[in-house]
Amino acid sequence: MKNAFFYFLLCPFLGLINAIKHYRSSWAKPTLIAFVAFFGMSMVNNEDVDGSEYVDKLVIMHATSVDFDTFKASFFNETEGLPDLYVGLVTYVFSLFTDNGQLLFFFYGFVFGYFYINNIWLVLNETRGELSWLPILFLLTFSFVLGFWLVTGVRMNTAAHVFFYGAFLYLYHNQKKGIFIALSSVLFHFSFVLPIGLFLIYSLVRFHYRFIYFFYLASFFVAELNVEFIRTFLELNLPDFLQPKVKSYLNDEYVEVFYDNIGSRNWYVNYYLKLLSYFTLFFISVLIFKSNLTKGVQKLLGFSLLFLSVANITSLLPSGSRFLIVAFLFSMATCFIVIAQVKFTLVTRSAKFLSPLLILFCIISIRMSFDFINITTFTNPIVVLFTDINIPLIDFFK
C-alpha cells in the first residue's frame, strides 16, 4: 500500500507502468486501482464525453441545495432525467459539500477501478509464473474490452464489471456471494435486468455448453428485430418505474438519432467489435468439442455462449450492442484461461493463427482511448485539482 500511495501522489501513470512490470507483486493491484481513480479525476471532460452530464447535474444540485425528498422524487422521472440509483445517490451525496466534478469522478474512478482491476486479477490468478506473448495478448484484449478510459460511461460500464466480478466468482469458483454481487449490478444500470435474468436461468437450468453453441451459431442469422413489437411488449410487462427508460431508449426519435450517429462515426468505431466476434466464433468452435475442459471452464464457456447468443440478437436494437461488449468479457476470460492452461496443439495453433484479429482490436482500442486521456493524466492529483486543462491526447497526433 505504501508504493500505491507514493505513486498516486507523485505520478499515478508512472505507478501504472511499474505495476504492470511487477504484476506479481503485492502492491501492483492497489497501485493500478489508484491509477484508475486518478484517471477518473484527470480525464477529458467536455460535452462530447458521457460523464459531463453528471458533472453538470452535480453543479446544479449543489447550487440549488436539493433536499432529499426532491431528490427521491426525481428518480426515473422523464423530465428530471436522473439515472439509476448508483449515479443518482452518489451525485446527491457529493452535491451536499462540493460542485467539483473532478472529486466526483475520482470516486467513480475508484469504484470502477476496484472491480476492473480485480476482474483482471481474477483471470490472471489462473496462471503461474511468467506469461508468454500469446496469453499476454489475450489478457490485454480482455483488459481493453471495457478499459479504464471508459469510466466516463459510469453507469453501464461499472455495472458490467460488477456483474462480471460476481458472475465469475459464482460460475468459476462456485462462491455463492458472487450471486449477490452480480444482482447488485442492476443498481448501477437498470438494463442489467437482462444479464441477471440470463445468469439466473443458466444457474438454475445449466444447459450443456455444446447445446448452447448451436443456439450461438443460429444467433448470427437473425437479420433484424421489430422495434415496435419489442417496445410494446416491454411497456406491457415492465414495472412502472422502468417505463420512462424504455420510452427513452426505444422511441422513434432516439432510434433515428442513434443510427445517424453510427453513420457519422469512423469506420473502426463501427467495426472493431466485429474483430472480437470473428475471433470468438472461430476460436470457440475449436474449443467446443474438446473433452478435457475443466468444470469451471465448461460453466464459464456455457454462460459466455448463452450471453453472446442473446447479445448478438439485442445488438440489432439501438444501444443493444452494449450487451455484446459485456458478453465479450466472459468469452475473452474463458479464452485466456484455456490458452494459459491447456496444452493442446490445435488450440495453440488456432490462437496464433487468429491472433492478428486481437492485435488489431488492441491497436484500435488504444487509439480510441486517446480521445479520453487528458495530458494531465501524466501528472498528479495536485496538478489536476489546481488546473483546468482539457486537451485529449489525440490532439497531438492530428
Image (cartoon, grey):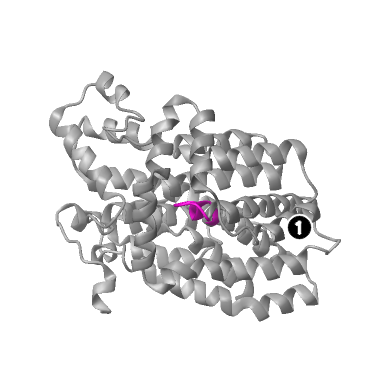
Asked if residue 151 lies left or right of residue 45, the reply is right
Residue linked to disc 1: 214
Whether 205 is among the magenta residues is no
Taking depth in this image into account, of 15 and 154 the one nearest to the observer is: 154
Tell me if residue 169 can be seen. Answer: yes
Instruction: Find the residue positioned furthest to the right.
Output: 291
Q: Secondary structure at mark 1?
A: helix
Asked if residue 391 lies left or right of residue 368, the reply is left
Return the x and y of residue 223 as percentages of the image width and height: 59, 60
Return the x and y of residue 239 as percentages of the image width and height: 49, 26
Neighbour tally class for label 1: few under 14, some 14-19, many 20 plus, Cα within 10 Å: few
Whether 320 is among the magenta residues is yes
Instruction: Find the residue positioned furthest to the top.
Output: 69
The answer to which image quadrant residue 89 occupies is top left
Asked if residue 340 lies left or right of residue 343, the reply is left
At 69% across and 67% down in the image, what residue appears?
Answer: 340
Return the x and y of residue 257 as percentages of the image width and height: 34, 55
What type is the residue that disc 1 sits on? Phe
Return the x and y of residue 293 as percentages of the image width and height: 80, 59
Indicate whether 80 appears above or below 41.
above
At 68% across and 50% down in the image, what residue appears?
Answer: 306
Residue extent of the magenta highlight: 316-324
Tell me if residue 127 can be seen. Answer: no
Indicate whether 140 appears above or below 320.
below
> Which quarter shows the C terminus?
bottom left
At 63% across and 47% down in the image, what residue appears?
Answer: 168
At 32% across and 29% down in the image, what residue appears?
Answer: 77
